[in-house]
Amino acid sequence: MLRPHRYLQQARRQLQEEKSELLRQRQETISLLQDTAIRHMRAEEACDGLVILDARYGPSEQDEGTEGLDVDVTIPMQALVNSSQLYIPGKRSKAGIPGFYDPVAGVPKALRVRYKFRGRMHYAEIPDYMPVVIPLKESSARYRQGSIVRIAVEPIPGR
């Protein structure tokens, strides 16, 4: 059995070995989604709706051992926005969503999203296998089965 630090080093090496093929496939997907994401972002900005500023998918635990093992999924997430809402069903890993992949097999993962909605900055952290419903209401931060989503809301300066 590998120690956690050693396991993450091995995962990082494996990711480097597979990286060229993974990156090629992912880049093709991102290229296909980019126009849709830009269209959705412009439409959302026009109505002060949901704009994904940064979205990352990776290990749930964030420390120096897991640094660099997350995937930028901002474009795929913005492409999924429809009418100022984003919904991803639960019970399945988010690694199967186009533009996502599993950066470290066997390690619990989470989706971290920074977004703007109605002139306010928001942050949501959603465990893998849990549904994603954005924008979140502060009062609906709890999911079934006791899993908690961390959220933060702060006003945008000048508004």
Image: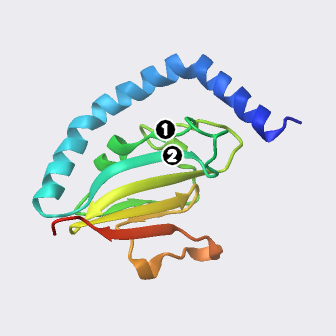
Q: Position of residue 47 (x, y in %)?
A: 12, 63
Hey, what amino acid is under mark 2? Tyr
> Quick check: 156 left or right of 125?
left
- Examine the image and state in which quarter residue 45 appears: bottom left
The quadrant of the rendering that contains the N terminus is top right
Location of residue 29 with respect to 73 vertically, above or below: above
Residue at point 21%, 37% (across, down): 35
Amino acid bearing label 1: Val
Tell me how the rendering is colored: rainbow
137 up-or-down from 32: above or below: below
Task: State if disc 2 and disc 1 touch (CB < 8 Å).
Answer: yes
Mark 1 vs mark 2, CA separation in Å: 5 Å
For label 1, the residue is: 71
The quarter of the picture where residue 9 lies is: top right
128 to 71, vertically: above or below: below
First reached walking from the N terminus: tag 1 or tag 2: 2
Q: Is residue 35 above or below residue 126?
A: above
Residue at 69%, 45% (x, y): give it: 107
Q: Residue at x 64, y 74 (%)?
A: 145
Q: Secondary structure at mark 1?
A: strand
Q: Which residue is at the front of the view, 12 or 38?
A: 12
Residue in front for this viewpoint, 56 or 131: 56
Residue 116 rendering spot, x and y as whole percentages: 27, 60
- Give me the disc on residue 57: 2
Q: Position of residue 10 (x, y in %)?
A: 73, 27
Helix, strand or loop at label 2? It is strand
Q: Assess disc 2: are there few (<14), some (14-19) or many (≥20) residues with their C-alpha within 10 Å of its C-alpha.
A: many
